[in-house]
Amino acid sequence: MSYIIQFIFAFLSTTGFAVFFNIPKDSVVKSSLCGAIGWLVYIISTKLLSSTIGATLIAAITVGLTGEFMAKKYKKPATIFTIPGIIPLVPGAGMYYTMLAVIDKNFIDAAESGTEAIFIAIAIAVGIIVSSSFSRALIKYKMKESK
C-alpha cells in the first residue's frame, strides 16, 4: 500500500478516535494530522530498522514532539494531540493474535505475540515520555536564556 493511502487511512482512523474522545472541534484535524504523521514515520522507520518496536519508539517520539509543538502553537494541552495521535501505533492486532493463540491453546505463539505487543506498548509510553520531557527541558532552557 502506498504511503499516501496509509497516511489517509491513519488520518481517518485518528479522526474517528478524536471525535470519540470528544476532542474540541477546532483540534480534530490537527490531532488527526499528528496521528497520520506518526504512522508515516512508523512505516518508514520499520523499513529502515526492520524492527517494529524501534519503529514504534521513533514514531511515538514524533507524535509526542508534534503534539507538544501543536500545543504550544495553538495554546491547547498536548494531550489533545498526542492521545488520538498514538492510536495508529497501538498494537491492537498483536493483542488480538495473543488472545486467539491462548484460546487455541497455542501458548508459545501467545507468549511471542503477547511479548511483542507489551514491548510495543512500552515503546509508545517511553516515546511520549521522552518527547514530553525534551519539550519541557527545552522550554526551561529558553526561559533561563531569556533572563
Image (spheres, rainbow, N blue to C red):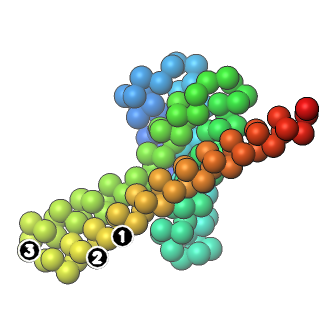
Image mark count:
3
- SS category of the residue bearing label 1: helix
Provide the residue designation for mark 1. 116
Asked if 117 appears above or below 82 in the picture, the reply is below
Disc 2 crowd rating (10 Å Cα; few below 14, some 14-19, many 20+) is: some
Name the residue nearer the viewer: 1 or 31. Answer: 31
CA distance for labels 2 and 1: 6 Å
Q: Is residue 137 left or right of residue 12?
A: right
The image position of residue 66, as x and y in percent, is 65, 42
Asked if 17 appears above or below 60 in the picture, the reply is above
Residue 19's quadrant in the figure? top left
Name the residue nearer the viewer: 103 or 78. Answer: 78
- SS category of the residue bearing label 2: helix
Taking the view exactly as shown, the residue that stands out farthest to the bottom is 108
Give the residue drawn at x 70%, y 30%: 72
Residue 29's quadrant in the figure? top right
The kind of residue on which mark 1 rests is Glu
Going from the N terminus, do you reach mark 3 or mark 2 first?
3
The image position of residue 24, as x and y in percent, is 51, 19
- As drawn, the label of residue 112 is 2
